[in-house]
Image: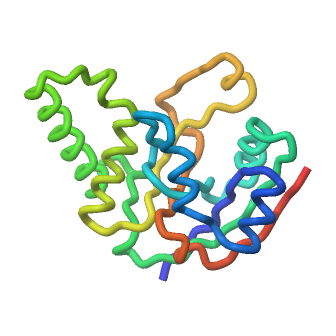
């Protein structure tokens, strides 16, 4: 059994509801995917910063007037996680291969990749997780905070490890860590 300690930035009311009822993955996905072509970067699920309370606090403060952070202890077996934190790992190679197939198909169908492939990474993660029955996705990502967010800075250099949990049964312990 493997364990990840994750922190989820949200608002105070949502934190209380999560503490009482757990993460409602279906509701999260419905709210996110209301917009056409809206797919989150690691696909569908509840998002956490791995072992990074500071980033979860910053994330909560950016989007909420009453920010709060929920800690979740995520339990999983090796077979349950798709981990692309290492660039040349078997999972990263599978991801790249899947991306190539999708892009070739789009090109063959003469689709405008820029418009039809919005959220491509998230779509690829969703497809891989469906095919292979993964419940947790883990990746090194770049999340802009403070001045970088204000100035819309994008970067190829990761500053966090994010975990996306697709099944709430993998989140075993939930606690509210901070409310400012």
Whether 24 is drawn above or below 38: the answer is below
Q: Nearer the viewer, residue 159 or 173?
A: 173
Number of on-image labels? 0
Residue 108 location (% of width, % of height): 8, 28
Residue 126 location (% of width, % of height): 35, 53
Q: Residue furthest top?
A: 151
Residue 113 relative to residue 33: left or right: left
Q: In which quarter of the image is residue 110?
A: top left
Q: Which residue is drawn at 75% across and 74% down?
A: 20
Residue 18 location (% of width, % of height): 71, 66
Q: Residue at x 52, y 51 (%)?
A: 30
Q: Residue at x 79, y 50 (%)?
A: 11
Q: Which residue lies furthest to the right in this view?
A: 180
Residue 105 location (% of width, % of height): 12, 35
Residue 166 relative to residue 111: left or right: right
Q: Residue furthest bottom?
A: 1
Q: In which quarter of the image is residue 135?
A: bottom left
Q: Nearer the viewer, residue 109 or 56?
A: 109
């Amino acid at each position: 059994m493997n364990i990840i300690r994750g922190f989820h930035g949200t608002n105070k009311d949502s934190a209380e509801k999560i503490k009482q009822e757990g993460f409602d993955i279906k509701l999260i996905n419905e709210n996110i995917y209301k917009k056409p072509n809206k797919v989150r970067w690691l696909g569908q699920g509840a998002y956490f910063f791995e072992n990074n309370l500071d980033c979860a606090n910053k994330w909560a403060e950016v989007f909420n007037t009453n920010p709060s952070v929920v800690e979740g202890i995520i339990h999983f077996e090796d077979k349950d996680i798709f981990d692309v934190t290492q660039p040349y790992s078997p999972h990263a190679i599978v991801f790249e291969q899947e991306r190539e197939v999708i892009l070739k198909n789009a090109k063959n169908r003469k689709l405008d990749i820029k418009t039809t492939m919005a959220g491509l990474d998230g779509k690829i993660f969703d497809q891989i997780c469906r095919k292979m029955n993964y419940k947790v996705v883990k990746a090194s990502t770049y999340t802009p905070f403070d001045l970088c967010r204000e100035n819309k800075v994008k970067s190829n250099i990761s500053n966090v490890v994010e975990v996306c949990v697709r099944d709430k049964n993998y989140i075993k312990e939930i606690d509210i860590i901070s409310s400012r």
